[in-house]
Image (cartoon, rainbow, N blue to C red):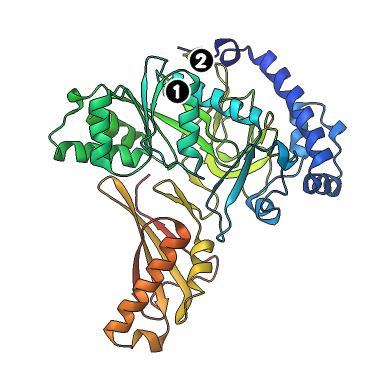
Amino acid sequence: MYWDKEMECMPREKLEELKLRRIKETVFRVYAFVPSYREKMDTAGVKPQDIQTLEDIQYLPFTTKQDLRDNYPFGLFAVPMSEVVRIQSSSGTTGKPTVAGYTRRDILTWSELVARALTCAGASRHSIVQVAYGYGLFTGGLGAHYGAERIGASVIPSSGGNTQRQVMLMQDFGTTHLACTPSYALFIYDVMRSMNISPEDLKLRAGIFGAEPWTENMRSEIETKLRISAHDIYGMTELIGPGVAIDCSCKEGLHIWEDHFVPEIIDPDTGKVLPPGSEGELVITTITKEAFPLIRYRTRDLTSLNYEPCKCGRTHVRMKKVKGRSDDMIIVRGVNVFPSMVESILLRVPGVEPHYLLIVERDGTLDELEILVEVSEKVFSDEVRKLEELNKLIRKELESGLGIAVKVRLVEPGSIERSEGKAKRVVDKRNL
């Protein structure tokens, strides 16, 4: 089943022609209207007219998270604010969020892309889609919501949390498709069991799961427990939100919608473009976004690309499930967490040493983040009551800054392992 068969199954030759035309238009536009891009291109000695083939994009400079920080909040927008109809954001590395702007056409494009994704998961206008992603500045909730409405499905905007109520709505409203994080889907199953509700009591047929890394083993567990087809959806705020890619019924890689995004795989250390099939860092250029176009954005996600036509008939390239990242960012319950952000919060607290460690574990179905924090010798030797008060203060500051619940363990000076090279800040025990 297709949402836009003509585009999704376009012959590769025509798809390449479309991509080239759109990328040329995008490069000319950012050079004309985004001073930061113009400066970077001038420094690199590249002009818009130099882009004559798709391979020529390798000569364009990369865009990184640092560029987003340097131009916060609206410095990378390519249209005046009078044309921006929505602003959304995700957590940033130092307390400042990653900001995305959308024109009216951008919102329509986004809806179309999520409509394609939902259709890949078997949704139609006869479906009832329960969106249990968070709503608000986070792109997950509204992204899935608008896409479901675009295909004419009935949407239940349940947002996250209040899981017993989620289960009640699924049962009473006849939910057929669930959109949430994969770990939350498993938690929903646990709550269903505690309520003596089985999958046979529901009409659930498929799930669209993203916003955090997950494995094929986790997919199998979700499908077995909930008796549904589980689909992996990929996206990020900077690129547009959810809907950049999704796996179809074949589940042999996620289709990246190449009429809107041009992907590359690079060596994360050298920046050199790698041949098809190679594993490396995913770089994406947006070629239809109006408000916030991105040129060669380094996602830091590690994957590979397969350009062979899929058995489903779609011709768009497939990316392998993301296996990790080339930086220290971790995703916990759908929230981006950077060690540098944790550090900036900790160093505001008196008595805390600049040594810490993030430990991520999966307790049952939900991720848990524990942060080990070294304190000074004087503080560590204080009475228990004062240590408890400091622990409470640090936890409050971290939860406010990160936007998720954390555990904090205060440890004595020198107990966190030191390194002569890059400090080890993250221990991920989730077996992703």
Which mark, residue 3?
2
- Above or below for 194 versus 174: below
Image x and y of residue 47, in percent? 86, 38
The three-letter code of the residue at mark 2 reads Trp
Give the residue at x 42% y 66%: 357
- Element type at mark 2: loop
Q: In this view, does 359 lie to the left or right of 170?
A: right
Are discs 2 and 1 less than 8 Å apart at CB?
yes
Q: Say few, some or many: other residues with alpha carbon within 10 Å of mark 2 (under 14 / 14 to 19 / 20 or more).
A: some
What residue is shown with label 1? 118
Q: Answer whether residue 255 is visible to the viewer in this image.
A: no
Give the residue at x 23% y 36%: 189
Q: Which of 4 and 276 is in front in this view?
A: 4
The three-letter code of the residue at mark 1 reads Leu
- Element type at mark 1: helix
Q: Is residue 98 left or right of residue 56?
A: left
Q: In this view, does 75 lie to the left or right of 430?
A: right
Give the CA separation, mark 2 to mark 1: 9 Å
Image x and y of residue 200, in percent? 18, 23
Image x and y of residue 417, in percent? 42, 72
Q: Answer whether residue 409 is visible to the viewer in this image.
A: yes
Tell which circle, 2 or 1, labels the residue nearer the N-terminal end. 2
